[in-house]
């Protein structure tokens, strides 16, 4: 992998869409360039949309929409990566955790979503393994393709929703959409074309596809941020089931000196 | 509700984004206009993005990306609507089923997703009620905000993923994203500002927000459809867990004379 690269515009930079290619560059360097390019384009065109191919894993997905929020723009970012998820009713992997990140400016308490389209990502299964505790049904499959509660037996992820009766096919479909909007759209690798984790093919290029969007919401409604704050409050002020623990809301702290609020998993679900 | 309306462009039609407003028109009439406008814009700009406010429920979400597929373009459509879903840990509704529809051209066997961001939509609960059978955990809540297996006790939907331990907060977050990208972005109603089903306020305008996107994938990769067919095949050819029933895949028939494939709910999950 080259740590520095020359980025070639293969789609005109004078319109609102761009595609960068043939970089094989360091993840976050390419990603940063792309999100700032999307922001720049959205300042004139209302929406800026940038795809990149031949990229690598780009770190924390939510980092990119956080950059658009700083400019009071809405941001969307997605990437594909090495297969880890089994499609509904399949016993082998064909898609990855394929994350979706969305950031929306809202006063001093913005909306930030950064989620895998699998039921959970690897860390949560690892936590259960180290605590020597079971995982819930619907997080992972064993080698036979059957949902398992044993973290040691988990060999691939299930999609968001888990098994079919809980609409896991929707998580599988969302992961497919991410693969299409990133890998296929950018002309990069996708699905099982991407090298697997821990494979012997470590000299293969990842050639991931990534998508970065910035939208200027003030083009459409000058009251956008006021209404976003109002939406925040409507969701936060829903009557809770448990008075002893707070509602969940996608958010992050108002200043960069504060950490993002952590989920306290020891509390009542 | 006016069945015919005059549509005013309040954002210039000479760039790739548009917003239509003050219609209060018949759902599918407005939606059709918007998706064709998005297609028209994508032909010159690569991406066409149209928002509409003061609209009404627009029928089958998947209908709109099916129009983009006919032009060999990728299509995305979303709408918000009256609150039916309780946020994770809340006992009252604050978001709707907020559907996401995505269509992608792929030879003669295209990709079509049309999904609610709730675990299931109303029809599936109604089927169980008529069959006098329980619903699975994670589909719906009772009046106390607790997951129920009794279809008669279901009073609001749970998000995709169900309860918190199965990542239901991701479905809740996705529904929030749809509400933001439709209602808040268009300057329409959102969340609990939208009139409730069966409320007495039947003379209130719905004022829903909707989003229509068309993307010309050939701008980026001339092999797009070939690669989409390849992705289809990779997902379809995953090794199945159950040999007696087929894998699930988002798709629709190649000709309009064929019905979309139906899910056979009597078969093994």
Image (cartoon, coloured by chain):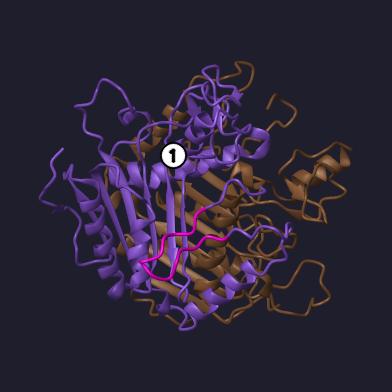
Chain colours: A purple, B brown
Residue on which disc 1 sits: A97
Comparing A120 with A265, the one in front is A265
Taking the spot 19% from the left edge, 60% from the top edge, the residue there is: A12
The residue carrying pointer 1 sits among few (fewer than 14), some (14 to 19) or many (20 or more) residues within 10 Å by Cα, namely many
- Does A175 appear above or below B41? above
Residue A269 position in % (x across, y down)? 66, 47
Give the quarter of the image for residue A241: bottom right
- Does A7 appear above or below A14? above
Taking the spot 59% from the left edge, 32% from the top edge, the residue there is: A135
Left or right position of A220 against B163: left
The N terminus of chain A: image quadrant? top left
Q: Is residue A236 magenta?
A: no
Comparing B263 with A164, the one in front is A164
Q: Main secondary structure of the magenta part?
A: loop
Question: Could you tell me if residue A100 is visible in this image?
Answer: yes
Q: Is residue A256 magenta?
A: yes
Disc 1: which chain?
A
| Label 1: element kind | loop
- Does A104 appear above or below A269? below
Comparing A203 with A135, the one in front is A135
Taking the spot 56% from the left edge, 75% from the top edge, the residue there is: B53
The magenta segment:
A249-262
- Does A227 appear above or below A9? below
Comparing A179 with B21, the one in front is A179
Residue A237 position in % (x across, y down)? 66, 70
Residue B33 position in % (x across, y down)? 52, 68
Left or right position of B156 against A54: right
């Amino acid at each position: 992998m080259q740590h520095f690269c020359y980025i070639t515009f293969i789609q005109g930079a004078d319109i609102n869409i761009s595609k960068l290619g043939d970089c094989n560059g360091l993840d976050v360097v390419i990603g940063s360039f792309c999100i700032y390019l999307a922001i720049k384009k959205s300042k004139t065109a209302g929406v800026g949309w940038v795809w990149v191919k031949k990229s690598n894993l780009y770190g924390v997905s939510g980092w990119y929409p956080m950059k658009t929020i700083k400019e009071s723009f809405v941001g969307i970012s997605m990437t594909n990566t090495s297969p880890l998820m089994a499609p509904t009713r399949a016993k082998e992997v064909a898609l990855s955790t394929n994350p979706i990140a969305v950031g929306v400016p809202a006063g001093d308490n913005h909306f930030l979503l950064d989620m895998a389209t699998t039921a959970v990502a690897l860390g949560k299964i690892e936590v259960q393994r180290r605590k020597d505790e079971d995982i819930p049904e619907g997080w992972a499959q064993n080698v036979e393709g059957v949902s398992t509660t044993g973290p040691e037996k988990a060999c691939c992820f299930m999609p968001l929703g888990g098994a079919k009766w809980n609409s896991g096919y929707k998580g599988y479909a969302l992961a497919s959409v991410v693969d299409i909007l990133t890998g296929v759209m950018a002309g990069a690798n996708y699905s099982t074309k991407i090298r697997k984790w821990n494979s012997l093919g470590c000299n293969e290029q990842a050639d991931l596809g990534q998508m970065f969007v910035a939208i200027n919401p003030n083009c459409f409604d000058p009251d956008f941020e006021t209404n976003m704050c109002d939406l925040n409050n409507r969701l936060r002020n829903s009557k809770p089931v448990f008075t002893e623990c707070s509602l969940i809301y996608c958010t992050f702290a108002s200043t960069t000196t504060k950490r993002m609020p952590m989920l306290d998993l020891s509390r009542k679900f």
